[in-house]
Image (cartoon, grey):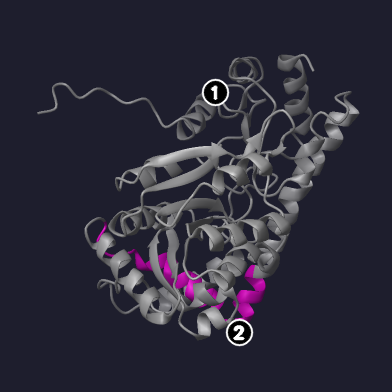
Amino acid sequence: MFADIKLLPPDPILGLTKAYQEDPRTKKIDLGVGVFRTLDGRTPVMKAVSQAQAIVDAGEKTKSYTAGEGAAGFASAILNLVFGADSDIVKSGRAAAVQAPGGSGSLMLAGGVLKRAGAQGISIGDPTWPNHKPLLSAAGVEISMIPYYDHASASIDFEAFHEAVKELGPKDVLLLHGGCHNPTGSDLTKAQIDTLAETALDRGFLPLIDFAYHGFAKDLESDAYMVREFARRLPEVLITYSCSKNFGLYRERTGAFIAVGPDADRANAVKSHAINVARTSYSLPPAHGGLIVAEILNSPELSKMWRDELTEMCATVRGNRRLIVETAEKIGLGNRLSFIQSQNGMFSLMPITPDEVKAIIEKHGVYMTSAGRINLCGVNANNVEHLVSAYRDVTGA
């Protein structure tokens, strides 16, 4: 049966971590996998998560299956977080949520639901998170890449992006990053978001918003602008949500598939199909992460603690961006890397070629993807000069 099965190469991002771990050099930097890190390189358990977990564990009386929509209290808590507790979207029932195994599981559900709905294709701005295409195309929906980022100027080419978007029609889907664009860090402005919402209303295409870094750009309220405006202006929106970054629940695989419809009946109909798609795959979602999130969001004390911690994490990432820019200026690179400070979230694309990436890994132990994507959480005051000096060395900048 498996005689002709060949060994696949390691995942390009996860393989970086393995190579970094096996590198015997003490002077090395891991800028690959997208997890938050402290100054000493740890990915800590948030205090609010620890306390919520203790409450959940103490009160747990069964290991029976959870419901199809997820852990008790999770769906309503996530909807309140995404849209605001006083939102008409929530009060009217226009939004319905299903817990899924992380943002990836949410995207898988989206692909399955869109296939059933007869979507002609999904358009995605180039570049995007590498797993977007395989996750969504696995359902049999065609993926098209359209212009988004101009590498020369290290900024969004909104004119080219919008021109491509204006070609979409009622059976088309447009995937948008809800904030902290992965891998570029370049987010749409409020004015650009408004323009796209009007175009979606005019052309009739369906926005699919991947909301994986809520709270990591500016704050929870500001970061929700796209999802709230699209839901307010448009009859239908799909949202895939991840709790991996903002709750630090990476290994608990906790996320949500959210459907916004013109009314509660349509939203619940879409929700029923998401639950059915899950039934044919992982069947039912894992409860633990969902219970932790619900416990935090439904407790005023834990919610405040979590929000304060998230604010600190966001400030750390912004500080790391500033460190790179200031260090680059200090060692003579001028404003070559200044664009990094104006971006959001964990990621940015260094102006570096694949051959230069290979050189920076081999010569200096600075690990990043071949496209030059770096995780800003891997940068700190102890290693930033090594990173920037290594960059200058291999690029000749």
The region drawn magenta spans 282-306
Q: In this image, 376 relative to 254: left or right?
A: right
Quickly name the residue at label 1.
23
| Among the 4 quarters of the image, the one containing residue 325 | top right
- Residue lying at 55% horizontally and 48% vertically, measured from the top left: 165
Q: Nearer the viewer, residue 382 or 154?
A: 154
Q: Nearer the viewer, residue 146 or 20?
A: 146
SS label for mark 2: loop
Q: Amino acid at mark 2?
A: Asp
- The circle drawn on residue 36 is none
The verdict on residue 297 being magenta is yes
**Percent coordinates x, y for residue 233 in the rendering:** 58, 70
**Percent coordinates x, y for residue 167 in the rendering:** 52, 46
- Residue lying at 25% horizontally and 65% vertically, measured from the top left: 276
Q: Of helix, strand and loop, which mostly describes the magenta segment?
A: helix
Q: Nearer the viewer, residue 133 or 195?
A: 195
148 vs 308: above or below: above
**Percent coordinates x, y for residue 27 in the rendering:** 67, 25
- The circle drawn on residue 86 is 2
Q: How many marks can you see?
A: 2
